């Protein structure tokens, strides 16, 4: 367990340094720290699976795929920081990889927690919110990217809504942590997008 704690601490340090570098307009250094933080998430998953003797290979595989697609999303969005001339191509690619990662995360989530038709209301709510934000802020995005963005936020709101329902029905620590992580996903991805 100590290994996971050390990896988590190192990951948080790299994420914090990333933010500090970005505030000082040191894009390259910030990008490298972001990659290291993203790699830290993957390392935590692999180490956690090893320490649990690979007890749930299906769940682990789905989470690992989710994290790897997230890492790719970080790479594309990081490159846009140092090569802004490719921003129009890199942002949809990065967002698309994050969307695929969230789909794998949702599959892992649904392997443990039941997602029913009622929870799909949260997905539709996320799509509606994303569409409203695009219209209200008068964002100029092509329709294909708008569709990816809406599906992406639909998945985020779905995970957060289901997590909230789980906390309401059974306020166990894993459920609370799942809700907190889902909320942090929405906050961080929104901040990155802005």
Image: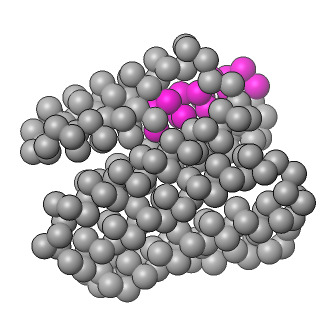
Location of residue 145 with respect to 98 vertically, above or below: above
171 relative to 38 in the view: left or right: right
Q: Quadrant for residue 46, please give it.
A: bottom right
Query: Residue at left 65%, top 33%?
Result: 110
Can residue 55 be seen here? The reply is: yes
Q: In the picture, which quadrant includes the N terminus?
A: bottom right
In the rendered structure, does residue 73 fall within the stretch colored magenta? Answer: no
161 relative to 57 in the view: left or right: left
Residue 87 x, y percent position in the rendering = 19, 65
In the rendered structure, does residue 159 fall within the stretch colored magenta? Answer: yes
**152 and 18: which one is in front?**
152
Q: Quadrant for residue 129, please give it.
A: top left
Can residue 182 be seen here? The reply is: no
Residue 62 x, y percent position in the rendering = 64, 49
Q: In the picture, which quadrant includes the C terminus?
A: bottom left
**146 and 40: which one is in front?**
146
Residue 139 x, y percent position in the rendering = 13, 43
Query: Residue at left 30%, top 24%?
Result: 128
**97 and 51: which one is in front?**
97
Magenta stretch: dominant secondary structure: helix
């Amino acid at each position: 367990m100590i290994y996971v704690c050390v990896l988590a601490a190192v990951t948080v340090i790299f994420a914090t340094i990333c933010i500090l570098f970005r505030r000082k307009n040191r894009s390259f250094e910030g990008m490298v720290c972001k990659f290291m933080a993203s790699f830290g998430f993957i390392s935590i998953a692999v180490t956690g699976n090893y320490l649990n003797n690979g007890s749930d290979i299906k769940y682990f595989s789905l989470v690992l795929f989710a994290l790897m697609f997230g890492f790719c999303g970080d790479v594309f969005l990081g490159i846009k920081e140092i090569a802004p001339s490719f921003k129009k191509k890199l942002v949809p690619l990065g967002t698309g990889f994050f969307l695929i990662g969230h789909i794998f995360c949702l599959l892992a989530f649904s392997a443990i927690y039941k997602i029913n038709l009622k929870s799909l209301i949260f997905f539709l709510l996320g799509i509606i919110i994303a569409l409203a934000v695009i219209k209200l802020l008068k964002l100029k995005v092509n329709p294909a990217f708008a569709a990816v963005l809406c599906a992406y936020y639909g998945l985020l709101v779905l995970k957060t809504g289901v997590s909230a329902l789980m906390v309401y029905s059974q306020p166990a620590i894993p459920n609370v942590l799942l809700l907190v992580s889902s909320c942090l996903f929405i906050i961080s991805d929104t901040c990155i997008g802005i």
